[in-house]
Amino acid sequence: MSNARKLADNLPIEGQLSGRNLLTNGAMQIWQRGTSFSGNSAYNADRWKVDNNSGGGGQSTDAPDDFTYSLKIDPSSGNAALRQAIELPAAGEGGVFRSGKKFTLSFYLKSANAGEAINIFAASGTTVDATTTAQVNDTSTGLTTATSWTRYTYTFTSNNVGGSDTCYNIVPYVSSPSGATYWTGVMLEEGSQASPFEHEPVGVTLSKCQRYYYHLTGSDEKGPNGKHVGGGVMRNNQYFYGFPVTFPVPMRVVPTFTYNNVTPYVADSSNGYATLSLAAANTNNFSFNGNAAGAISGAGAGDAVLLYCSTETNHYVRFDAEL
């Protein structure tokens, strides 16, 4: 069966027509940061930054046919906006986003209220929030919300990318909704016609997301102080060397590093503690380096050090290379 016939019948396609979605995690499959969110300007589903979810939102199983999840956005006040930054080949290099080229954005949306305006904004910039060069600023799309799942499409023409810009930002939003909105099946493709949403294996989507964000928690192997994350060796009774972390895929840039409820313990020493600090990182791997506020009783050179997530709640090590 030809790809044209498959498109007409809304069947999966292959060959040159695959890989056509320029956005990542459009089906809201990956949620490394969690599944429930409340607050301003934060990533919810991977690669999707939400301007405002003060009314509470996140992962929802309310989804159209052929989808498992949607992203719920309830801003309480203001716009229900989600945004994704598409990485450009280099600063000022638009790549496929050359001037005069047509693109079609499509998405599924369900809203608590019908008749509210759906707007589209697109701009190149240096971060996901940037508006350096506006390609689209359409508040008169003619699209409005419905209370049942509806697929919307919008075609636009790209303008020049700014000379220092490193990403192309896509921002569909509902203007000041009076209730929750639900989004999924978001796709941006070249051309002036929307094709059926391109579903891909969840592992493929996860790998794409991990170029920009990697969330590490303890393994299922548990010790006396929580979940085991890694290990190292004491240099003496006060300093110890690295816990290497190899990223699943190379990250976009050297990532920023944060952690919570993660503690190193010296083997066979009662609650030996050392403060973590960043030793070295690059786009392929990372290692921890630690030193104690004071000498650890009973510890010595060559002793094993274990790194634990010290609680079962809200424990993580995060590596962030988002645009």
Image (cartoon, rainbow, N blue to C red):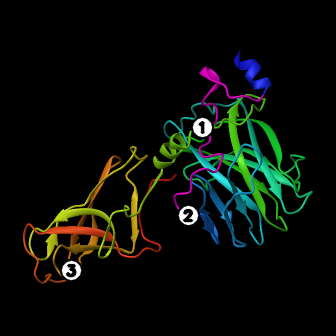
Q: Which of marks 3 and 1 is nearer the N terminus?
A: 1
Residue drawn at point x = 66 percent, y = 25 percent:
13
Q: In this view, does 174 lie to the left or right of 92?
A: right
Magenta-drawn stretch, dominant element (helix, strand or loop): loop
The residue carrying pointer 2 sits among few (fewer than 14), some (14 to 19) or many (20 or more) residues within 10 Å by Cα, namely some
Residue flagged by tag 3: what amino acid is it?
Gly
Q: Which of marks 3 and 2 is nearer the N terminus?
A: 2
Q: State if disc 2 and disc 1 touch (CB < 8 Å).
A: no
In 3D space, how far apart are the residues under numbered discs 3 and 1 (Cα atoms)? 46 Å
Query: Picture coordinates of residue 266 (x, y %)?
Result: 19, 74
Query: Picture coordinates of residue 70 (x, y %)?
Result: 70, 54
Residue flagged by tag 2: what amino acid is it?
Gly
Query: Picture coordinates of residue 267 (x, y %)?
Result: 17, 73
Residue 281 appears in the figure: no
Q: Is residue 183 left or right of residue 282?
A: right
Question: What stretch of residues is rendered in magenta?
Answer: 10-34
Residue 17 appears in the figure: yes
In this view, 220 is above or below 67: below
* Residue that badge 2 annotates: 34
Q: Residue 272 carries which label?
A: 3
In this view, 166 is above or below 270: above
Residue drawn at point x = 23 percent, y = 79 percent:
273
Q: Residue 200 carries which label?
A: 1
**Number of numbered discs visible in the structure rendering:** 3
Residue drawn at point x = 31 percent, y = 76 percent:
225
Between 69 and 132, the residue placed more toward the observer is 69
Query: Picture coordinates of residue 295 (x, y %)?
Result: 13, 82
Which element is circle 1 on? Answer: loop
Between 195 and 203, the residue placed more toward the observer is 203
* Quadrant in which residue 6 is drawn: top right
